[in-house]
Image: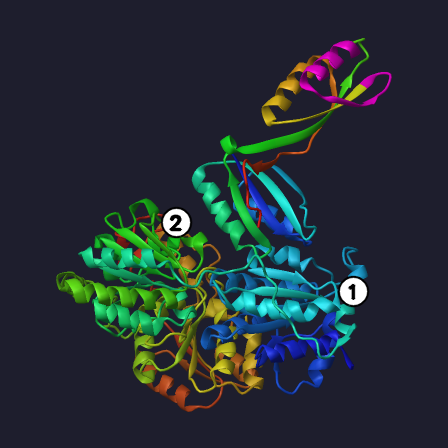
Amino acid sequence: MNQIISVLVENKSGVLAKISGLFSRRGFNIESLTVGPTDDEKISKITIVVNTDEKTVEQITKQLHKLINVLKIQKLDPGCSIRRELVLVKVNTENKSRAEILEIANIFRANVVDVCKSSLTLELTGAETKINAFKELLKPYGILEFVRTGMIACARGKNIKK
Amino acid sequence: MSKINGSKMLLKCLENEGVEYIFGYPGGKVIPIYDAIYDEKKIKHVLVRHEQGAAHAADGYARATGKTGVCMATSGPGATNLITGIANAYMDSVPIVAITGQVTTPEIGTDSFQEADITGITAPITKHNYLVKNIKELPNIIKEAFYIASTGRPGPVLVDIPHDIQVALIDEQVKGEINLPGYKPTIKGNLKQIKEAAIKISHSKKPVIFSGGGVISSNASNLLREFADYAQIPVVSSLLGKGAYPENKKLSLGMAGMHGARYANMAFVNTDLIIGIGVRFDDRVTGKLSEFAKNAEIIHIDVDPAEIGKNVKVAIPIVGDAKSVLADLIVEYKKLSSEKGLADFSQWLDEIECWKKKYPVRYDRNTDLVKPGFIIETLQELTKGDAIICTEVGQNQMWAAQYYKVLEPRTFISSGGLGTMGFGLPASIGAQFGRPDKLVFDIAGDGSIQMVSQEFATAAINNLPIKIILLNNGNLGLVKQWQELFYNERYSETCIKGCVDFVKLIEAYGGVGFRVKEKKDIEKAIKDAISIKNLVLIDFWIDPDENVFPFVAPGAPISEMLDHKQVKK
């Protein structure tokens, strides 16, 4: 089962390597990992998605706590959290399919960010299921490139950050 | 405002941390630091003969004294030679600070001469590490490095200092400050949990304390003694826990596990409550995990929350420093006992006493062969337990653990988690520097000692009166033992017989050597060694067929112990 761990870290070089190293050397596989600074530029937020059981997540969390530059760890319950990914999809439009593709984009509220004679690039944000559905619908037209950010997430309601 | 360079600032910071010794080896990218060491008055630099020796010596010093050990090496190969020692300190939670030189900041990442990404390489084997990128950070980093190494669950911290930082100037007056918002080890245990633990102990019938290296590193041995003696609960030790509770006392069951005493393992099999303190329930102790202490609930006290529940299921977890938690537990248990009467475990103790009589750790005493068990027992008698015993790794280590009854904490120094051959000699050098008042022995095997025999020079030049008890059987004995028992006696590459004259070798380095081939000469040799105020090696030609028993086969439950008789053909 996919589990989401949200980690606040000091924004220092080498921190990401220590975190990813901790996962690899204990044999935990990362599904996705995103990182970016928070409103405080000295602090970054890392969102990690792992496909594993409860016991392993508990051990991962404890091991993460041991890293000196880790400030706070939160396990996000899928039911009470907002999860988003951003994706850029470049679709083939050589078969006069542009109108159909734009219709699909419209339904999904995706934006057109680039267009040329033979392709169309769309931008979409949403939860994982929405992005997967979008991808399936576009597949028949020929996906030339598909780039996703990996998940970012935060808990619903008033959430204490520090 | 007067300015000094980074190298002088480094030494100043080390002085402020109370550092007495740096175990190190110079090289191209630490010359500025060594130039500063040339004028250093307060800190003594000990020149080893290989950087691995420096890391182990810092480790031995730390274990013997309780202070943080310091080692130093140059960039690239110097730094990578420290790695085994750093990994060893990490596995056994020993506070050391390793300082390495690095190529200049602009050269980093260009595969410059003698460059190695040592912070990257050591990330999994350090508690934390730093690459100093700005001279202004140096005082803070050194302060933090010592703080991190010595607090919470202790461990090694590496500080990598580029060459240009070593020569950059900084205001002499700058003092280091600690700013670690993400590091707050839990020292005090949760009182509610401690109260519950006291109740659980008082309700148990067959409790056993399982005491580990954490009791020693938190200086909680006195409290452990007070608690065990008051509650009358027997104490089983891990290898690193030896000495936390005096092993000559009735309540002590010695070491448990793969080569532990049968009665200690039987206590685990039969107990209904294990009180684990500063232990990590390592596989060498538990044997087959699913069979371990099946009838027992576990109270686990440890400063590292990640250890709790990692290997065994825990009924009452208590995160905290062993010393603080034991102090609270004693108060709570005494309070409970004064209200409801002290729980009586005498029947359980009687049961254990029967096992002790029935299954002693033993070797064949009715032989003229030189038996390692007899050598170590003789050593025990002659020192009365008042000595620091370091060990190498292998059969020598297990015999030392089985037959030497350790009475005080910080007097048994052995590589536990990593099992590093070649640890004992450099560790004994560190221990002897830290404790010049103590007799220091290195119980060694002919395999392990050859991994670090260049350090005889370090010991001899510094006039360290270390005594090396070499249990020479011409074999890489523990591996040979496995080959004998599990690989049809196919002794692949484990015979190392006859190539080295160890007496001549120690003499070449300026020490004194004797050879003992007969049982009757053992006592005199050890007596003579003790009376000589010099580096001594006794080359005991022990019975090459002697194995370490009892023995739990790997992956077997600890109830299934093999002994001499069962494997005799």
Say whether residue B38 is left or right of residue B85. right
Mark nearer the viewer, 1 or 2:
2
Residue A115 falls inside the magenta stretch: yes
- Residue A154 found in image quarter: top right
Say whether residue B253 is left or right of residue B86. left
Instruction: Identify residue for label 1.
Output: B104
Instruction: Identify residue for label 2.
Output: B309
Please report the bounds of the magenta region as a residue range: A98-119
Residue projecting furthest to the right: A117
What residue type is disc 2 on? Answer: Gly
Element type where label 1 sits in the image: loop
Observer-nearest residue: A2 or B235? A2
Label 1: how many Cα within 10 Å (few below 14, some 14–19, many 20+):
some
Q: Is B539 located above or below residue A75 in the figure?
A: below
Q: Chain of mark 2?
A: B
Element type where label 2 sits in the image: loop
Q: Position of residue B152 (x, y in %)?
A: 48, 63
Question: Which labelled disc corresponds to residue B165?
Answer: none
- Gap in angstroms between the C-alphas marked 1 and 2: 44 Å
Observer-nearest residue: B553 or B446? B553
Say whether residue B73 is left or right of residue B208. right
Label 2: how many Cα within 10 Å (few below 14, some 14–19, many 20+):
some
Residue drawn 73% across the image and 16% down it: A142
- Residue B337 found in image quarter: bottom left
Q: Chain of mark 1?
A: B
Q: Earlier in the sequence, mark 1 or mark 2?
A: 1
Residue drawn 36% across the image and 50% down it: B554
